[in-house]
Image (cartoon, grey):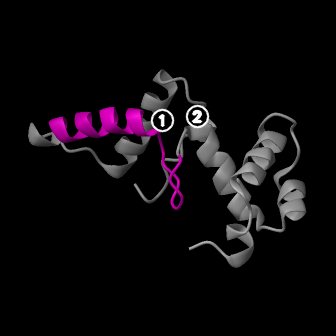
Amino acid sequence: MESDTTSKISEEQWKEALRLVNEDGKSKAEVARSLGVPVSTLKTRVQNSRTGCTKRGALRALPSEVEATFAAHVIEMADAGFAYSKSTLQDFARQFGRKAGIPPQAVNAGNDW
């Protein structure tokens, strides 16, 4: 759930904040201060904007369409008796991301996997 401060910020303000960070190179801390939001909230929005994730909440490791392809492959392999370990899934997510043109630092295949 978003805080009162965060929910009072319009989508236009968020778009401008993302532009300042992604295109103008402003620091996340500086932009977050100007909006009056926690830096962690802005970091999440920036990460989501870079990975194509539009859902709020936990970060996605891959954009939705890439994640769907990845999930289908994992399910197909599991059905064939070849289940992957968590660390292997994380490595595969990064590989899928690379093939989809996503920078490795933008693929958030963390411990929640």
Q: Residue at x 52, y 45 (%)?
A: 53
Q: Which residue is mark 2?
A: 104
Q: Which residues are magenta?
A: 54-77
Q: Which residue is mark 1?
A: 94
Q: Residue at x 39, y 34 (%)?
A: 65
Q: Is 35 in front, or is 102?
A: 35
Screen quadrant of the N terminus:
bottom right
Report which quarter residue 8 is drawn in: bottom right
Mark 1 closeness class: few <14, some 14–19, many ≥20 residues within 10 Å: many
Which secondary structure lies at badge 1?
helix
Kind of residue at disc 2: Pro
x then y, percent, for residue 55 = 50, 53
Direction from residue 22 to residue 63 in the image, left or right? left
Which secondary structure lies at badge 2?
helix
Direction from residue 24 to residue 8 in the image, left or right? left
Direction from residue 48 to residue 111 in the image, left or right? left
Say whether residue 73 is magenta: yes
Q: Is residue 106 above or below residue 10?
A: above
Screen quadrant of the C terminus:
bottom left
Q: Residue at x 71, y 63 (%)?
A: 40
Q: Is residue 66 above or below residue 85?
A: above
Q: Residue at x 74, y 63 (%)?
A: 9
x then y, percent, for residue 45 = 66, 52
Report which quarter residue 91 is drawn in: top left
x then y, percent, for residue 104 = 58, 34
Q: Is 34 in front, or is 97?
A: 34
Distance between the alpha carbons at the discs numbered 1 and 2 = 6 Å
Kind of residue at disc 1: Arg
Question: Pointer 1 and pointer 2: residues touching (CB < 8 Å)?
Answer: yes
x then y, percent, for residue 12 = 74, 49
Say whether residue 67 is magenta: yes
